[in-house]
Image (cartoon, helix red, strand yellow):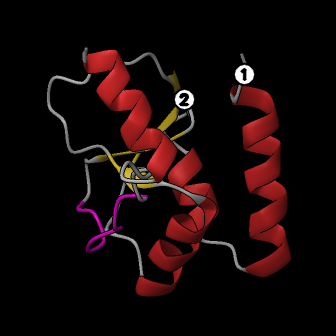
Amino acid sequence: MTLLVDFARRLIGIRSRRAIEAPGPPPQAGSMLHFSGVRMRVSDTPSAEFWAWLVLMGWRECRYPGDRRQYEDLPESAFEALAVRNGASREAVYHQLMQTYHKED
């Protein structure tokens, strides 16, 4: 019965896809960020510009203490390497990191 109700709700559009979680304030040093199976530790509180860039790229703060998902961890220096750069050099470092550590299933 539940399957029939779920199908009917989906068919008439009552069910909708979940929205992307709002980014929230910049994370504090020591917290973790995640994006599509990759995780990175925040070494220092990011500037507003850098946090906006990370959010635009899809990164969000890990807010679940018991998170059991599997992640590829970026090296400790990754956050700082991205934070000190701007523009095209930041994009280049970011793409290099993602090519190295992001393994698509």
Question: Can the viewer see residue 104?
Answer: yes
Q: Please provide percent x and percent y for residue 30.
A: 25, 48
The answer to whether mark 1 and mark 2 are in CB contact below 8 A is: yes
Residue highlighted by disc 2: 37
Q: Residues within 10 Å of mark 1 (few under 14, many from 20)?
A: few
N-terminal-most mark, 1 or 2: 2
Question: Which residue appears farthest toward the bottom when viewing the image?
Answer: 49
Residue name at image x 40 percent, y 72 percent? 46
Q: Residue 85 falls in which quadrant of the image?
A: bottom right
In the image, residue 96 lies at what x, y percent?
82, 44
Query: Disc number at residue 103?
Result: 1
Secondary-structure class at tag 1: loop
**61 to the left or right of 10:** left
2 lies above or below 25: above
In reply to whether residue 67 is colored magenta, the answer given is no
What is the magenta range?
Answer: 20-28
Q: CA distance from mark 1 to mark 2?
A: 8 Å
In magenta segment, residue 22 = yes
Q: Residue at x 71, y 16 (%)?
A: 105
